[in-house]
Image (cartoon, coloured by chain):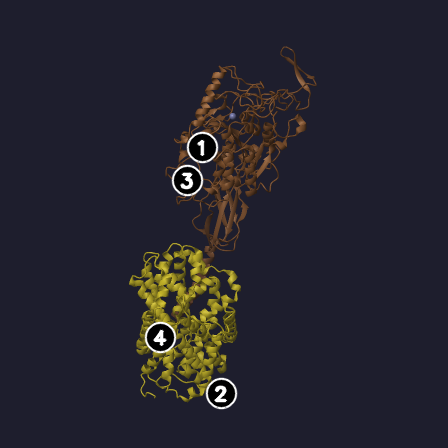
Amino acid sequence: MVEGKQAKEQWGSRWGLIFAAMGAAIGTGNIWRFPRETAVNGGGAFMIPWLLFLFSWSIPLLIAEFTIGKNTRFGTIGAFKKFAGKKYAWMGAWMMLVNIIIMFYYAVVMGWVLKYFTVAFSGELKAGVDTEAMWEGFITSPGQVVFFQLMAIGISTFVVYKGIAKGIERTNKILIPSMFVLLIIAALWALSLPGALNGLKYMFIVRPEHLGRAETWVSALSQSAFSTSAGFGMAITYAVYMRRKEDTTLNAVIAGLGNNAASLIAGIAVICTVFALSSTNVEAIGVMKSGNEGLAFIHLTRLFTMMPGGLVIAGVFFLAMAFAAITSMISGFEITVRNFMDHGWSRNKSLTVTSSCIFIFGLPSALIVLEGGIPAAFKNQDHVWSFGLIVSGMFVFFAVLKYGIDHFRETLVNTEWNDLYIGKWWVYIMYLFPLQFGFLMLWFFSQSISLHPDSWWNPLEPEGFATIVLQWGVALAILIRLNDWINEKPLAESDSRDGEIVEVEPE
Amino acid sequence: MIRRGLAILVILIALANTADATAYESRDVDNKQNENGFDEYFQEYFTYNSMMEAFGHLEANHPEIVKVYDLTATIDENRKGIPSETWDGHKVWAVKVSDGVDREPDYYSDPSEPVILLMGAHHGNEWTSFEVSLYYLFYLAENYGKPPTDNDNDGQVNEDTVDGVDNDGDGEVDEDEIEGRVTWLVDNREIWIVPMQNPDGVVADTRKNGRDTVPGLYGENVPTSGVNTNRNYPYMWGSPYDPQTGQTMDTPNPQASEYRGPKDGYDDDGDSWIREEYRPGIFRWINDPNNVDEDPVNGRDDDNDGNIDEDPDGGLSEPETLAISNLVELLDWNNDDKTDVITAISYHCFGEMILYPWGFDSEPTPNDGLFQYLGNEMSESNGYEVIQGVDLYPTSGDLDDWLYGSHNIMVYTFELGNDDDGYKVEEANIINISMMILPSQLYLTEMAPMIEVARERYIDSLDISLPMINHTQKKRITNSDFTYTVDVEVSNIENLEKGSIYLYYKVGESAEWKKMPMKERDSNHYRATIPRQSGGNHVYYYFEAKANYIEAVSQDGIIYVFSPKYGQHDPYSYFVDISLGDTFGAIAAMVMMMAFIFGIIYTGLGKSLKMAIDAEKRKSRA
Ligand SMILES: [Zn+2]
């Protein structure tokens, strides 16, 4: 199955890589999750740990991923096989699995965003319209939901089909600056509204009592982890297409900071809009506390109708969100596609299989909607698998640990082509990984139990504890059992790529 | 001459008896279609005995609001030898209608409930007068606590309250009472009704009482034996006579229909001192075992001993008048020797008139304007002529002069019915005339507290400026700790009792009301701060205050609640928003944090990008 002549795929320029990495990092989570988490967890009090974890989790992990990807020149499975050893190929498979499962429902979410982009211009949206009924009406219409899900998958497939330079790179180079511009427009509009100051106050004033709460820190860590794509395998995958002389460290820092920069603008746009257009601060805070979908599709949508020009901003907002979603989706596609290609499939074939899977296995998220418009399967997948990323991050840490953290830093990270020297600090921070991981997991599990005291043991409770254990358990069991089978598959030759393979020294 | 006059009188009475109910046809009362459940009691005249039965019935059915008193039982027989029952062995019965009568001690009056006193049959032959009194008693007792009822079965409820006005414009008057109004009145007033002040006269159908003043003549319906109980009150007793005619409508003649009763002859103050003019114009006091009646009741200290009216020369010689006097004096909740009775009506027949003091003097009373105002208000519903008592004919020793002159009670005498009706309205018209009088009874009952205020201030109407609490809600309340400051401005502040404004508040609809005093900020601004709350952002509140003038004038401490008459004020409701900090400090904290976060991220990003750009330049050169 090895295709003899594979076109040499590479980033056209460093900026292409940076935009692509930023595009992967900046997703819907920056636009609806970050403002909500900030508002709920104490405003400025949340931003302090959020910023801290950018440097203690996200950027160090991105550096490790870039480094592993650039050195192995394989997607996640190949990278782990080569770098951590054959015994640990399943870890790479886990990363890919987590990624593709997230794509299952991410495609549905992107469909929702596309739908609401059209809503802003369809005339459906006007002052006084019941946006809650509108949302329920939409989400309980399988035809519509699947149509937009297919559209989201179609767009992503098209981009990934075009390949790295002509597809992913070109798309990100257009969409990411556009998205920044759109977000800035939305933010400036929000700031121009009377009452926007309340939003700024709520967003930035440190509410110190939150600093003492575990929830604030956990939320900041998980927000930082989910948002930057660290642990996704994106950095490993995109590093595959790096030029040999490419930097890994500064690019990681830029991707991380760029992600948080976008979050800040989105936060101002969302929070100021909510506070300026809500009739009371209490209402505004209530809106900020409603879930992601409620915030974006019910409340923001309603608030946009309350000001002249709001519909245009609604269009701007959902377009920015759509761009953010597309650029993240294509990275998710590519992570899976790369793994197939590593094992000898063509891009087309890999993409066909990946897209089909994402569509088919995304259908439950699209279609299983409980009474009251609650997408149960979506919530379950989100609940179980977003924390899979944290486990993935731990696997990367394991791989680095196995290699020797300082050794990794000295020999692999700090190469002559890097523009940013990584000091010993990075080693110390890596040692904090198990602590951060443990903290997060403990909290996650205990929340899954304590929030559902009567049903946490029931695998059918979509946000309970049992469903995590069951799904992760089954996935891990299967992957570990398949480890030998995965290893039997030969990796495609890497000479078509501009890099060198590091032989891992046996322990 | 006398014979001829008598003959004319007999003919008039005969005419009155043959005159049918058409006498009322021209009046609104004829059109009244409603029936009260107790109307069966008013198909024929009550007797003394049937009245007592009716009392038993009312007291048994409404023990919480109806209590029957024997006023004659309050008489101390040993004092002046006046018996503790009437001369013919009857009782002067009074009925108190108010909430809580079953829980309160005898003759207690609630300081927050103004007292009104209604009396009938000072003259025993004037039967219409006790019917009208009894009708009001039944009306209050039987309508108390009733749910809103469609009394006239027209499909509408409470559309035409009893006020003499056709409120719903259907051509009928007062046909559907607001039951809640009656309940409110009974709950907030103390209504004393003495239907038969002179039961001897009622039983014997005579004007005067049963005292045997002319042996052998008693019992016939001509001026004969007995005392006219409406000439037997002590204020200016026996003194006046008409300066023009030289005649007076009361007399020391025991045979006369206007016999005022015997001289007192009792040393009420026990001083046995008497003032003697031993030279022309020069007086001296001498101790005289016959020193009695030296300070007649006229509002002056005649004997110059520092006490006023303490040794009357006459009046209250009869059990009937003494019973009323005892009642008026017993109704004194704080024992300040000022009666709690504020206003009163005495019913007589006939002449379609509303009389007010004085009866002995053509000078107006100090409250003349108010007397006229209230009289005219009551006349609205019956068309009676409102005149000062003396203008009908001069009298002394009558109830009105004494209640007003000695007790400051705003008292009226109604002369019920027209010439045709005479002393006894046709039985078929008892309900009609009672319904016609009802609005005036309700009016006086309802206005009693305002009447007190107007009387004390010599205001000629009831347009009294109660202190009003003016409050404007803030538009948007923001507060980080959910405290909320409520400011009010009080108009007519001079009428507000200091420190009596309270703020009632609750947070969340289902919470309990709490109460806190409002603090004075300057002459007419008050403030209270609702403290930090949990339970939600919806705050409800209202105000209560006391008017000061009652307190200042009579120490009665009557409480005025600023609410519509028949219900509670709808509370203000507020949404207290969370404040995000309006201080300079808050803005500064925000700006600093923005600078910090933006500084790190954007400076970091900018520097990183610059590094990358420089590196790319360097690499492309290399
Ligand atoms: Zn009379």
Give a yes or no on whether discs 2 and 3 share a subunit: no
User: From the viewer's perspective, is the residue at label 1 or at label 4 nearer?
Assistant: 1
**On what subunit does the disc labeled 4 rest?**
A
Residue corresponding to mark 1: B429
- Residue A61 spot, x, y in % from top left: 45, 75
* Tag 2 residue: A506
Cα–Cα gap, marks 2 and 4: 36 Å
- How would you rate the neighbour count of disc 4 (Cα within 10 Å): few for under 14, some for 14-19, many for 20 or more? many
Residue occupied by mark 4: A330
Label 4 near label 1: C-beta < 8 Å?
A: no
SS at mark 1 in the image = helix
Task: Look at the image and tell me whether residue B494 can be seen.
Answer: no
Q: Is label 2 in a helix, a strand or a loop?
A: loop
Q: Colour of chain B?
A: brown
Does the beta carbon of the residue at mark 2 sit less than 8 Å from ligand 1?
no
**Front in this rendered view, residue B316 or B608:** B316
Q: Give the side of residue B226 with respect to residue B290, left or right.
A: left
**Residue B385 location, quadrant:** top left
- Both marks 1 and 4 on one chain: no
> Which chain contains the residue that carries disc 3?
B
Crowd around label 2: few <14 · some 14–19 · many ≥20 (10 Å): few
Residue where numbered disc 3 is placed: B160
Name the residue type under label 3: Asp
